[in-house]
C-alpha cells in the first residue's frame, strides 16, 4: 500500500513532485510506484486463499482511485495533477488485483507506463517553455507556439481517458468490465473515476493551451532532444494496448502460464456495458469544455467542497495533528532530558 500510494499511505507521492520532471516520470510511471502492484500480482497464489484480503484490496483500490481523481480536478500545479492521476490509476490496478484479474492489472501497469511517462515529460516541456512556471492558472493560449508538445499531450490524455484506439482503452476498460462481472461497488466507482479522469485531463489541456490569458514571456517549443523520448512514448501510448491484447494476447493463460493465478475469464457480451466507460470519459471531456472553454456551466459554488478538495481531504493536516506534532513534542522532551540529565551526568564523570 505504501509503495503503491494507496489511500492513507499516499501522501509521499505528490510531494515527490519536487524532483526533476524525468525523475517524476520514472517514479510515477514505470518503476517505483508500480512495484507494489507487481508484488501483489506475483503473490497471487497467496491472495487467492483469502476472500477477505481480496475484498480489502478492492475497497482500498476503489477508494484510492476515487479520492485521487476528486483531488486532481481542483489542483493547479501541472505536475501534481498528473501525480494524483497516477495515484488514481494505481487504485484501478489494485481493484483488478482484488477482483483476481492479476493479468489485467499487469496489462494496465504496462500501458499506463507509456502514457503517464508521456504526460509527465510533456508537462516538463510545458514548464520549460513557460520558464519554470507550473501553475496552470497562469498559462494559456500557447498551443500554436508549442504544437509538438500540444499534440503529444493530447495523445497522452486520450490514452489516459481510455478513448479508442489508444492504449488505455484496452487495459482500463478490461478492469471496468471485470468489475461489472464480479463486484458492483467496484464497477460503479470505476465508472465515476473514468468520468473524473477525462474531466481533469481536459481541464489541464484547456487551461494550459487554450485559456485566453496572454503570456508576456517568450514561449518556444522544446528542442529535439526533449521531443524524441516523447515520440517513442507516444507510439507506445497508441499501440501498446492493441499490441498487448491482440498480438501478445497478454490476458490469456497461454501468455502467463504459471507466473500468475489465472481465473476463468469474465466475458462481457452486453454492448452497452462495453460502451459505458467510453461514454463516461466522453461526458467528462464534454463537461470540461462546457466549464473551461465555453463557460456555459459555472465552477463549483460550494466553497467548502472546493476547499476540501484543494486541501486533499485534509490528510496532511490530520497527519500533522495526530502523528507529527506528538512526535515533535516527545522528541523535544527527550532532547531536553538528554541535555539536562545525560549530558550533565557525563560532565560530572569527566
Image (spheres, rainbow, N blue to C red):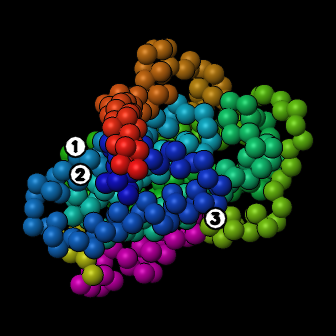
Please tell me which residue is depicted at 41% across the width and 63% down the height of the picture.
34
Q: Nearer the viewer, residue 30 or 280?
A: 30
Q: Give the residue at mark 1.
A: 185
Which image quadrant is residue 302 in? top left
Please tell me which residue is depicted at 22% across the width and 58% down the height of the picture.
98
Give the vertical position of 248 relative to 219 (above or below).
Answer: below
Question: What label does residue 58 carry, if any?
Answer: 2
Of pointers 1 and 3, the one earlier in the residue sequence: 1
Secondary element under disc 3, as helix, strand or loop, is helix
Is residue 243 visible to the viewer in this orientation of the structure?
A: yes
The stretch of residues the image draws in magenta is: 236-258
Proximity of marks 1 and 2: CB atoms separated by less than 8 Å: yes
Q: Give the residue at mark 3.
A: 234
Please tell me which residue is depicted at 25% across the width and 77% down the height of the picture.
260
Residue 333, x across and y down, in percent = 34, 32
Horizontal side of residue 96 vs 307, given as left or right: left
Mark 1 vs mark 2: in front: 2
Category of crowding for the residue at label 1, using alpha-carbon neighbours closer than 10 angstroms: few (below 14), some (14–19), many (at least 20): few
Residue 110, x across and y down, in percent = 46, 68
Of pointers 2 and 3, the one earlier in the residue sequence: 2
Category of crowding for the residue at label 2, using alpha-carbon neighbours closer than 10 angstroms: few (below 14), some (14–19), many (at least 20): many
Question: What label does residue 301 carry, if any?
Answer: none
Calculate the distance from the C-alpha at mark 2 to the C-alpha at mark 3: 31 Å
Quadrant for the N terminus, please: bottom left
Secondary element under disc 2, as helix, strand or loop, is helix
Amino acid at each position: 500500500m505504501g509503495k503503491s500510494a494507496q489511500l492513507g499511505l499516499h501522501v509521499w507521492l505528490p510531494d515527490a513532485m519536487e524532483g526533476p520532471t524525468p525523475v517524476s516520470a520514472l517514479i510515477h510511471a514505470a518503476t517505483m510506484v508500480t512495484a507494489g502492484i507487481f508484488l501483489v500480482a506475483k503473490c497471487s497464489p497467496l491472495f487467492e486463499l483469502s476472500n477477505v484480503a481480496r475484498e480489502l484490496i478492492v475497497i482500498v483500490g476503489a477508494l484510492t482511485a476515487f479520492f485521487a481523481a476528486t483531488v486532481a480536478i481542483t489542483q493547479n500545479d501541472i505536475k501534481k495533477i498528473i501525480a494524483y492521476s497516477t495515484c488514481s490509476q494505481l487504485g484501478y490496478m489494485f481493484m483488478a488485483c482484488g477482483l483476481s484479474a492479476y493479468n489485467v492489472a499487469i496489462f494496465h501497469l504496462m500501458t499506463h507506463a507509456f502514457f503517464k511517462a508521456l504526460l509527465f515529460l510533456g508537462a516538463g516541456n510545458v514548464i520549460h517553455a513557460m520558464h519554470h512556471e507550473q501553475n496552470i492558472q497562469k498559462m494559456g493560449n500557447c498551443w500554436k507556439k508549442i504544437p509538438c508538445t500540444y499534440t503529444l499531450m493530447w495523445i497522452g490524455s486520450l490514452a489516459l481517458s481510455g478513448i479508442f484506439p489508444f492504449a488505455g482503452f484496452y487495459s482500463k476498460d478490461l478492469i471496468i468490465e471485470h468489475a461489472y462481472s464480479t463486484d458492483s461497488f467496484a464497477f460503479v466507482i470505476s465508472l465515476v473515476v473514468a468520468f473524473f479522469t477525462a474531466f481533469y485531463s481536459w481541464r489541464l489541456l484547456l487551461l494550459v493551451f487554450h485559456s485566453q490569458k496572454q503570456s508576456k514571456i517568450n514561449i518556444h517549443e522544446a528542442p529535439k532532444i526533449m521531443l524524441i523520448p516523447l515520440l517513442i512514448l507516444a507510439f507506445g501510448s497508441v499501440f501498446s494496448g492493441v499490441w498487448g491484447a491482440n498480438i501478445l494476447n497478454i490476458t490469456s493463460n497461454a501468455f502467463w502460464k504459471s507466473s500468475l493465478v489465472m481465473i476463468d475469464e469474465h466475458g462481457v457480451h452486453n454492448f452497452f456495458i462495453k460502451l459505458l466507460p467510453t461514454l463516461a470519459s466522453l461526458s467528462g471531456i464534454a463537461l470540461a469544455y462546457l466549464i473551461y472553454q465555453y463557460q456555459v456551466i459555472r465552477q463549483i459554488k460550494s466553497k467548502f467542497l472546493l476547499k476540501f478538495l484543494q486541501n486533499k481531504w485534509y490528510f496532511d493536516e490530520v497527519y500533522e495533528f495526530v502523528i507529527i506534532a506528538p512526535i515533535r513534542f516527545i522528541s523535544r522532551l527527550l532532547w531536553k532530558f538528554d541535555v539536562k540529565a545525560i549530558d550533565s551526568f557525563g560532565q560530572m564523570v569527566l
